[in-house]
Amino acid sequence: MAEKTQADVLREELGYKPQNAYRVLNEEEQTRVTKYCESYKAFLDRAKTEREAVNEAIRLATANGFVEFDRTKPLKTGDKVFFNNRGKALILAVIGEKPIEEGVSIAAAHIDSPRLDLKPNPLYEDHSLAYLDTHYYGGIKKYQWMTIPLALHGVVVRRDGSVVTVCIGEEPDDPVLCITDLLPHLGANQMKKTVSEFIGGDDLNILIGSKPLPNEEGTDAVKLNVLNWLSEKYGITETDFLSAELTAVPVYKARDVGLDRSMIGSYGHDDRVCAYTALTATFALTKPAYTAVTVLADKEEIGSDGVTGMQSAYLRDFIEDLADAQGVKVRHVLHNSVCLSADVNVAYDPLYPDTVEARNCAALNQGVVLTKYTGARGKGDTSDASAELMGFFRRVMEDADVVWQIGELGKVDLGGGGTVAKYIANLDVNTVDLGVPVLSMHAPFEVVSKTDVYMAHKAFSALLARTEKL
Ligand code: MN
Ligand code: MN
């Protein structure tokens, strides 16, 4: 073999060169990646809403020895607890060996995803077809939700306070719902519209029935038949819709993508891909040096407001309960803590090269993305992690053989976005973003690579099991 030139050596030793995970992982590790992703796909299929994600996470946590947090009971090293925030957000903690004053390690992902929520008075009939009117949740390209099979998930609180869980469309013999589109033959005017005008928010109406109530001639006969069906199946009335959270999500199950099966296509990778990988990292802990706190938050896609969103006090209050138990002020714990705000980032898409700056964009199979800042334009709306914090996580990950890369959220002047990072950073916690690169983010069918999913699990494991102080 030819001698390495000086340039070869310099490239290798001095250059930043993200690695394709397939060139780094041996066959045994690649098998582990595939196996891990099978369990991730099962999680995706069982957790299409934040409520379902909380239920599934608690089911898994319980199987892994976690018990419900009771602030009146003392905790010792190695204890595993979870705190269920109203069935829509979850905190898990594994108590560490060090005094809590030295800080905790936090992994914070979100479990809500863009979707179509039903309006409070959604059901109507038009020309003998029954519809559910929706109000979209999170940032979507509305046209992507037309002519795809939709399932209806959620809960309805009846007049007497009882709660009905609804899930229609997930079983193979279930009916599904959909939003119709105009035939191309008559679409000349429609297709002159811009994509953002293509279908309005108030026109995202889901077809739900066409059969009139038997022996009924009124113009609401189809709607009445739907109401009758809902009453018989779920014992709910039209008024009950106002005390409901019903949401339409894609019917798709998570599937391997690519002839090489190297990727996973699914609804809701953002951000269950970080939620699941943080969960499994948390489950594997026994006696971490620092107390590990994993948060699965709600409402990220609409700004993190509300009691179950990351702007709510529940994370701080939970840590305060842990601090109180050790007679320590919570602000001292928070100041010494480190957090990975676990969320997805854009993956380089060769079909849309103009939207990102390739040297600073993540790519599929190059590992988890460490994102110094998100935000928009001149770093508006971001907590922008310090060089020291970036250096810390880089060391933690490299020591654990995590394949990682850097990434920005697209071109500087183009758009941007945010995560929960700033809300946690604003609690005086050292916080940086880390997550999985995604193709078609926020689409009904998003794509991630299996190696990146596995590397996220490894990165969260390395953080939560860290022995190093920031
Ligand atoms: Mn996200
Ligand atoms: Mn998102």
Image: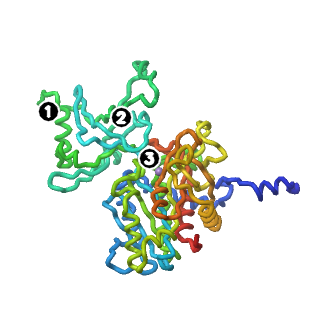
Q: Nearer the viewer, residue 60 or 441?
A: 441
* Residue position for label 3: 267
> How would you rate the neighbour count of disc 1 (Cα within 10 Å): few for under 14, some for 14-19, many for 20 or more?
few
- Secondary structure of the residue carrying tag 1 is loop
Q: Please state which amino acid type lies under the numbered disc 2.
A: Gly
- Give the x, y percent position of residue 129: 25, 30
Q: Quadrant of the N terminus?
A: bottom right
* Residue position for label 2: 201
- Secondary structure of the residue carrying tag 2 is helix
Between discs 3 and 2, the one toward the N terminus:
2
Q: Residue at x 14, y 55 (%)?
A: 160
In the rendered image, the residue lying farthest to the right is: 3
- Secondary structure of the residue carrying tag 3 is loop
Image height check: is 150 above or below 198?
below
Q: Quadrant of the C terminus?
A: bottom right
Horizontal arrangement in the rendering, residue 274 relative to residue 30 (left or right)? left
User: How far separated are the C-alphas under marks 1 and 3?
Assistant: 38 Å
**Circle 1/circle 3 CB separation < 8 Å:** no
User: How far separated are the C-alphas under marks 1 and 2?
Assistant: 33 Å
Number of marks:
3
- Give the x, y percent position of residue 98: 51, 79
Between discs 1 and 3, the one toward the N terminus:
1
Q: Which mark is residue 214?
A: 1
Q: Please state which amino acid type lies under the numbered disc 3.
A: Tyr
> Which label lies toward us, 1 or 3?
3
> Does residue 229 appear in this view?
yes
> How would you rate the neighbour count of disc 3 (Cα within 10 Å): few for under 14, some for 14-19, many for 20 or more?
many
Horizontal arrangement in the rendering, residue 228 relative to residue 312 (left or right)? left
Q: Residue at x 31, y 39 (%)?
A: 134
User: How far separated are the C-alphas under marks 3 and 2?
Assistant: 20 Å
